[in-house]
Image (tube, helix red, strand yellow):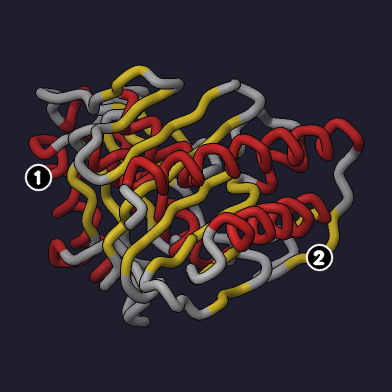
């Protein structure tokens, strides 16, 4: 039986290889292949090529495992394990040359659904910054091999908080209303543009907390595990596992202040159940 540490080794090796590939493609020149939910929700050719590289590498290493990728969808698992992949998280940053994008690979036990899965290992690699965030269950969180921890003892008024916005213009307007309500009660707010890196930033103490609505499974599968292994509490509506409705991540003491505010706002302003 493959250990969690061995699964992490596979995730990290493949993520590093994919990140190097995507970085070279960026240097060669970015080509937009399509848009998805809106004109601002772009897909580059490199997104698709990188995901195919990851899919092929994981299939070679773990042929009975399932796969769920942002660009190519899913394959059913025969082993009970599924790899959840975002080939380039932060595609708009990638397109513009902003050095805040990453390859995110996680392996989960159970169905590839955040409300029911158990994340076992994950790697998030930012090749521009030469940083690899890694974690497996019970093994702590690491950045380039050094153990990392969340910031503890930070009150809401001194918290640096990250967030993100949806691609739909009306959704962004409603999300911005909460930022307007919160920004006077915290140290400041950051919008980096890559959920995996936001969660890893919480893990490394570069952010005190993070919240976002509208995330897909591949956006947070690896990053949420890394944040949790660094000491963060990560949850969604009513303390349930994070899903598209809401994800909040912070050290437990800050979480107790940030989560209720985010939950209350999104419950009041969004009634679509997702």
Element on which disc 2 rests? strand
Kindly identify which numbered label has been placed on residue 34.
Answer: 2
Q: Residue at x 30, y 68 (%)?
A: 117
Residue placed most toward the observer, 233 or 86: 86
1 and 2 marks in contact (CB < 8 Å): no
Secondary structure beneath dot 1 equals helix
Q: Is 221 left, or right, of 130 in this rendering? A: left
Q: Of residues 209 and 262, which is closer to you in this image?
A: 209
For the point 30% across and 32% down, which residue is it? Answer: 141
Please identify the quarter of the rendering in which residue 266 is found.
bottom left
Question: Among all residues in the image, which is located at the extreme front?
Answer: 1
Relative height, residue 243 to residue 10 (above, below) = below
Neighbour tally class for label 1: few under 14, some 14-19, many 20 plus, Cα within 10 Å: few
- Callout 2: 10 Å neighbours few (<14), some, many (20+)? few
Question: How far apart are the two marked residues, 1 and 2, measured between alpha carbons?
Answer: 40 Å
> Which residue has dot 1 on it?
256
Which quadrant does the C terminus fall into? bottom left
Does residue 202 appear to the left or right of 132 in the view shown? left
Residue occupying the far top of the picture = 146
At x 68%, y 31%, the residue is: 98
Image position, residue 82 (x, y; %): 44, 66
Counting from the top left corner in percent of width and height, residue 165 is at 49, 53
* Numbered disc in front, either 1 or 2: 2
Q: Is residue 68 left or right of residue 95?
A: left
Q: Whole-percent x and y of residue 252?
A: 11, 39
- Image quadrant in which you'd find residue 63: bottom right
Q: Is residue 90 left or right of residue 148?
A: right
On the image, which quarter does residue 48 sit in?
Answer: bottom right
Which of pointers 1 and 2 lies earlier in the amino acid sequence? Answer: 2
Q: Which mark is residue 134?
A: none
């Amino acid at each position: 039986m493959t250990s969690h540490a061995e699964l992490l080794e596979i995730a990290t090796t493949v993520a590093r290889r994919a990140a190097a590939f995507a970085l070279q493609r960026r240097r060669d020149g970015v080509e937009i292949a399509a848009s998805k939910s809106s004109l601002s929700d772009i897909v580059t050719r490199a997104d698709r090529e990188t995901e195919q590289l990851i899919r092929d590498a994981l299939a070679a290493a773990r042929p009975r495992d399932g796969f769920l990728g942002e660009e190519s969808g899913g394959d059913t698992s025969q082993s009970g394990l599924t790899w959840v992949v975002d080939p380039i998280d932060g595609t708009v940053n990638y397109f513009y040359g902003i050095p805040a994008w990453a390859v995110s690979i996680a392996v989960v036990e159970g169905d590839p659904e955040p409300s029911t899965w158990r994340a076992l290992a994950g790697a998030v690699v930012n090749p521009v910054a030469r940083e690899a965030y890694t974690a497996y269950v019970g093994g702590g969180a690491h950045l380039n091999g050094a153990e990392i921890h969340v910031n503890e003892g930070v009150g809401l008024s001194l918290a640096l908080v990250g967030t993100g916005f949806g691609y739909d213009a009306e959704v962004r307007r409603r999300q911005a209303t909460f930022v307007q309500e919160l920004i006077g009660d915290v140290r400041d707010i950051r919008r980096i543009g890559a959920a995996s890196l936001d969660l890893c930033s919480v893990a490394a103490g570069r952010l005190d907390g993070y919240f976002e609505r509208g995330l897909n499974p591949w956006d947070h599968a690896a990053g949420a595990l890394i944040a949790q292994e660094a000491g963060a509490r990560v949850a969604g509506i009513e303390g349930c596992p994070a899903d598209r409705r809401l994800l909040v991540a912070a050290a437990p003491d800050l979480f107790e202040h940030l989560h209720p505010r985010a939950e209350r706002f999104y419950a009041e302003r969004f009634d679509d159940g997702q």
